[in-house]
Amino acid sequence: MNIDLSRFKVVYGDKVLNAISLQGVEFDGEWEKHKENVINKPKFIAILAINEDGNVIEIHDESWMFQFIPIVQK
């Protein structure tokens, strides 16, 4: 899975990074229960981002640890 997130900043802990893409999503529970719900929240996600040194990094953690903010240009 590769979803473009380049129009977003990602807040992770005390860092604000430029997001590149969503690399992976993991859900808890059984697939049958997952299919019954219209909206499911992932347990873990993995994203690619650019850190403060300009290097590409991957962060894999629980989804509640991330906040995505759209980049608004004028």
Image: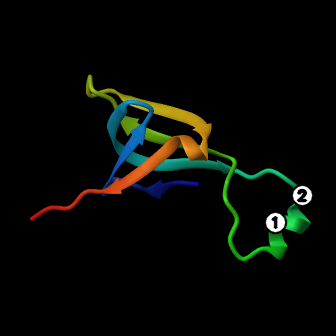
Q: Quadrant of the rendered structure where residue 31 is?
A: bottom right
Is 65 left or right of 7, judged from the image as shown? right
Disc 2 crowd, CA 10 A, few/some/many (<14, 14-19, 20+):
few
Residue at point 78%, 74% (across, down): 37
Disc 1 to disc 2: CB gap under 8 Å: yes
Secondary element at image label 1? helix
In this rendering, the count of numbered labels is 2
Question: Residue 54 location in percent, x, y?
Answer: 26, 28
Is 72 left or right of 65, judged from the image as shown? left
Please state which of residues 1 and 29 is positioned toward the viewer in this rendering.
Answer: 29
Residue 30, numbered circle: 2
Residue at point 45%, 40% (across, down): 48
The Cα–Cα distance between marks 1 and 2, rounded to whole angstroms, is 6 Å
- Judged from this view, the residue extending furthest toward the top is 53
Secondary element at image label 2? loop
The image quadrant where one finds the N terminus is bottom right
Q: Quadrant of the rendered structure where residue 41 is?
A: bottom right
Question: Residue 72 location in percent, x, y?
Answer: 20, 61
Q: Is residue 52 above or below residue 1?
A: above
The image quadrant where one finds the C terminus is bottom left
Disc 1 crowd, CA 10 A, few/some/many (<14, 14-19, 20+):
some
Residue at point 34%, 54% (across, down): 69
Three-letter code, disc 1: His
Give the colour scheme shown: rainbow
Q: Quadrant of the rendered structure where residue 5 is?
A: bottom left
Pointer 1 residue? 34
Residue at point 32%, 26% (across, down): 55
